[in-house]
Amino acid sequence: MSLPRALDGIRVGDFSWVRAGPWATRWLGALGAEIIKIEWPENERGRLPSSTTPQDVEVNLNTSGNFNDTNVNKRSLSLNVRTPKGLEIVKRLIAISDIVIENFSSRVLRNWGLGYEELCKLKPDIVYVSMSGYGHTGQNHHYTTFGPVAQAVSGLTFISGLPDKPPAGWGWSYMDDTGGMYGAMCALTGLYHRNMTGQGQHIDQAQMIASVPLTGPALLDFTVNGRGSRRDGFPPGNRAHWPGTPLVNNYRGPTVAPHNAYRTHPGNYNDWCVIVCHADEEWQRLVQVMGHPSWATSPQFATLAGRLQHQEEMDEGIEAWSMTLGKYELTEKCQAAGVRALPVQSSEDRVEHDPQLRHRQMYRELEHPALGVRKVQNAPFKLSETPAFNHLPSPLIGQHTREIVEGLLGFSHEELLAGYADGTFWPTTRARYPYMEEMLQ
């Protein structure tokens, strides 16, 4: 007998698109909620052909790898909500839903006739989560954003990069991912409040503002110490302190050494291991693991002050040793001795070679109708009584339209046929997929 899931019986009307909103509903789906993704082929930017489509697969609206990772655990209803008929259908769906999530700019759903006040008329206790870039209040609420843009205005981009060079940003759109996790948290909070009081609410999450707390130490350095952010010796991801810069220069907290990424055998692009010693005692453990080389036993390295002063020499000595071992072997030796060391892992390493991630079932295979069997990121946490896991592959666009319209909402098959004929369920100018033709039989 399978265990129940935490959100069994909860239905979510999902108006989200691209990454942040779909990332929120993805996790609600992993927790057991029924996620109905309302989408239209002319609007869902996330479905557009992308570089993440496998090379051996036809490029179309159903084969973006990024989309199909972001939208597991959902069903798809293709519906033009900008028509009176489509609007009426989606209102019927909302009336039997618990949560509505959207991540458009503040005016979009209101202009469609789907603002919070209107939805309360349909479902008084609806939990309505908005995830716009700038929120629904304030003089700039109408601004539109994407993750990297929100990242810039939040302050994260400014503190990333090399000294005296343009701010670098963080590469991947982390604001979308963190925004999605905040969105799921907001939805769960609203749901708990509704269950306790019987009252719904509008939760107004601003993606840009949600990213500001990630700059916490830099913000405190300004508000408490009056020091503006600088990139002296940046980026700070390897060394805790760079020679020739102020001793406190990058908001990491305690300045320690060694604290760096070291090249490992055989010295190729992906052969690195990070080693950190937070105390003199840990340094002595590392010296023991390295076999007590004569350079490491010198008194100049016995204290943190000495290691910082002679950091270049220390790092050269550590790397001469680390180059004799593979990164995984080095990790095992260090960890066995109580030294904090872990390999620098690529995507291939994480998916194919990491035994801990394999044990935790971080990448589970799902069979997708267009992509075949593929590994997809699973829930990164474990619940002992109500498991969270991916149970549905991402939907083909409009794959569940008949199932939802006829089975859930009670429309007749003739009304479904009429909706396809008049463009309510699919653009009349766009070719239908074979599975859509099967729905119409």
Image: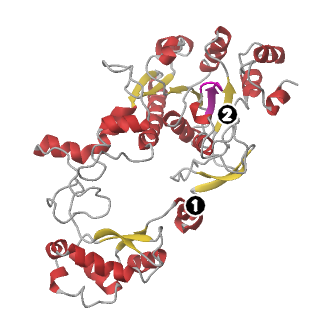
Tell me, yes or no, whether the highlighted magenta stretch contains residue 214. no
- For the record, the magenta segment spans 34-43
Q: Secondary structure at mark 1?
A: helix
Reading the image, the residue beneath label 2 is 75
Q: Residue at x 19, y 87 (%)?
A: 298
The answer to whether 224 is drawn above or below residue 271 in the figure is: above
- Please name the amino acid that badge 1 sits on: Val
* Spot occupied by residue 265 in the image (x, y as percentages of width and height): 46, 78
**Quarter-wise, where is residue 8 in the image?**
top right
Magenta region's main secondary structure? strand
- Residue 282 visible, this orientation: no
Which residue was labeled with disc 1?
351
Task: Tell me the distance, in whole angstroms, between the alpha carbons under discs 2 and 1.
Answer: 26 Å
269 or 224: which is nearer to us? 269
Q: Which mark is residue 64?
A: none
Instruction: Give me the residue at 43% from left, 78% from top.
Output: 330
Magenta highlight on residue 38: yes
Residue at 21% of width from left, 61% of height from top? 254
Picture coordinates of residue 17, whole percent (x, y):
55, 31
Q: Position of residue 38 (x, y in %)?
A: 62, 26
Residue nearest the observer in this picture, 339 or 330: 330
